[in-house]
Image: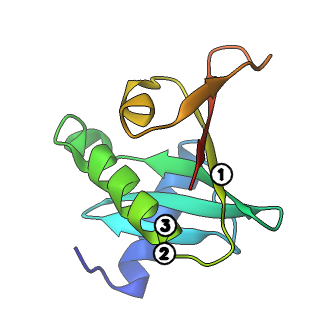
Amino acid sequence: MIVSFDDIEGIVERARREGIIMRGSDTIFAQSRSAACLRRIGQHTLRFCGCWVAPEERGLGIGKRLVAERLAYASGIENVSTLDTYAFHPRLFVSLGFESIRTYKIGTTYLRKRL
């Protein structure tokens, strides 16, 4: 779904109020009233971070669409060989080919995918 720049700014601001960190250098993806970002970490790695789904839209599959949209975008970037993310519920990422990597961050799973 295409949203205007003003809509994206409002979505990002709402996500920030909920504690989601989205930086100015991140690539922002928006679906309806929800947003997610993709951040460059190093030369060859991108991180899926900052996904926020509006409470009124949870359970509608918007989070899954945001993951698929970011994955398709990242796969098209030249010189990117690795994607990573931290996830509370890693099942979706595992089904997309991400592998769990041991980490000491409590409550989340660190996942990585080679392109």
Residue 69 relative to residue 61: left or right? right
Considering only vertical position in the picture, is 34 above or below 85? Answer: below
Q: Secondary structure at mark 2?
A: loop
Tell me what residue is drawn at x 54 percent, y 60 percent: 37
Residue 69 drawn at (x, y percent): 36, 63
User: As shown in the figure, which amino acid type bears the numbered disc 2?
Assistant: Gly
**Mark 1: few/some/many CA within 10 Å (<14, 14-19, 20+):** some
User: As shown in the figure, which amino acid type bears the numbered disc 1?
Assistant: Ile
Residue 10 relative to residue 108: left or right? left
Q: Quadrant of residue 39?
A: bottom right
Residue 88 drawn at (x, y percent): 52, 24
Q: How is the image coloured?
A: rainbow
Towards the viewer: 13 or 2: 2
- Mark closest to the chain's N terminus, 1 or 2: 1
How many numbered marks, from 0 up?
Answer: 3
Tell me what residue is drawn at x 49 percent, y 66 percent: 75
Q: Which callout, 1 or 2, points to the residue nearer the camera?
A: 2
Residue 77 drawn at (x, y percent): 57, 76
Tell me what residue is drawn at x 52 percent, y 66 percent: 74
Q: Secondary structure at mark 1?
A: loop
Q: Are marks 2 and 3 in contact (CB under 8 Å)?
A: yes
Q: Secondary structure at mark 3?
A: helix
| Quadrant into which the C terminus falls | bottom right
Q: Which residue is mark 3?
A: 75
Cα–Cα span, label 2 and label 3? 4 Å
Cα–Cα span, label 1 and label 3? 23 Å
Q: Which residue is mark 2?
A: 76
User: As shown in the figure, which amino acid type bears the numbered disc 3?
Assistant: Ser
Q: Which residue is mark 1?
A: 21
Cα–Cα span, label 1 and label 2? 24 Å
Towards the viewer: 64 or 73: 73
